[in-house]
Image (cartoon, rainbow, N blue to C red):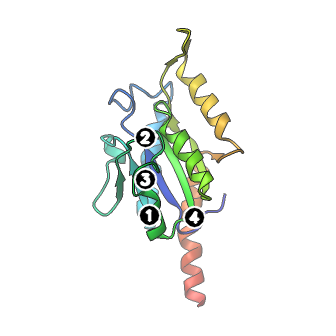
Amino acid sequence: MRLPADAVLMVVDAEGVNGDPLEDAGGRPEADSKMAALVAAWRAEGLPVVHVGPQSASAARPRDGETVIARCAMSAFVRTRLEERLDELGVTTLVLCGALATHALEATARHAGDLGYRVFVVADACRAAEAVDLRGRSWPAEDVRALTLAHLKGETATVVDAATALQAAATARARQQRKAGRA
């Protein structure tokens, strides 16, 4: 995975569905620690971080200067200034993590793809919650997570793991600095 130095980490609904990041972990409590590692890496590399929706999880809590988008629809692009803000930053690539249970991450990823952004979803930094379908059948969180990632994979986004995304973040800024040194 190669990232341009303009790659934005977009943390979508880090708080989760019920307000408890670990309660909604869907058998993946490590998702929060991987999300925290991604946020820390982006900040350390000076790469932009965008927060969408609830963000009370301490690891993903926005810092001064980071973009915060309050969603008013499933996609973070609908009736917000997200696209305008990304344009101001010169962004071409989005790396998404967060909660899959609200469907906002999937809707945002699809919308971003439609707008021409290159989209990566960090699978092990995403969590889901159990879902109930219209017939009252319960779907375990892990099944919801796997199905959502399968819908996005290849069609809309490249699905990667946190280790790959962390390595890509470290090399994105280093490549930009080497390039600037040659100019």
Gap between marks 2 and 1 measured at Cα: 17 Å
| Front-lying residue, 165 or 114 | 114
Callout 4: 10 Å neighbours few (<14), some, many (20+)? some
Picture mark count: 4
Q: Residue tagged by mark 3? A: 39
Q: Earlier in the sequence, mark 4 or mark 2?
A: 2
Circle nearer the viewer, 4 or 3 = 4
Residue 12 seen? yes
Classify mark 3: helix, strand or loop.
helix
Task: Inspect the image, locate mark 4, and give the three-letter code of the amino acid beneath it.
Answer: Thr
Q: Residue at x 31, y 64 (%)?
A: 65
Q: Residue at x 49, y 25 (%)?
A: 26
Task: Inspect the image, locate mark 3, and give the three-letter code of the amino acid beneath it.
Answer: Val
Circle nearer the viewer, 4 or 2 = 2
Gap between marks 4 and 2 measured at Cα: 23 Å
Mark number, residue 128: none
Circle nearer the viewer, 2 or 3 = 2
Circle nearer the viewer, 1 or 3 = 1
Mark number, residue 92: 4
Task: Inspect the image, locate mark 1, and give the three-letter code of the amino acid beneath it.
Answer: Glu
Gap between marks 4 and 3 measured at Cα: 19 Å
Gap between marks 1 and 3 measured at Cα: 22 Å
Q: Residue tagged by mark 1? A: 84
Residue 119 seen? no
Q: Residue tagged by mark 2? A: 73
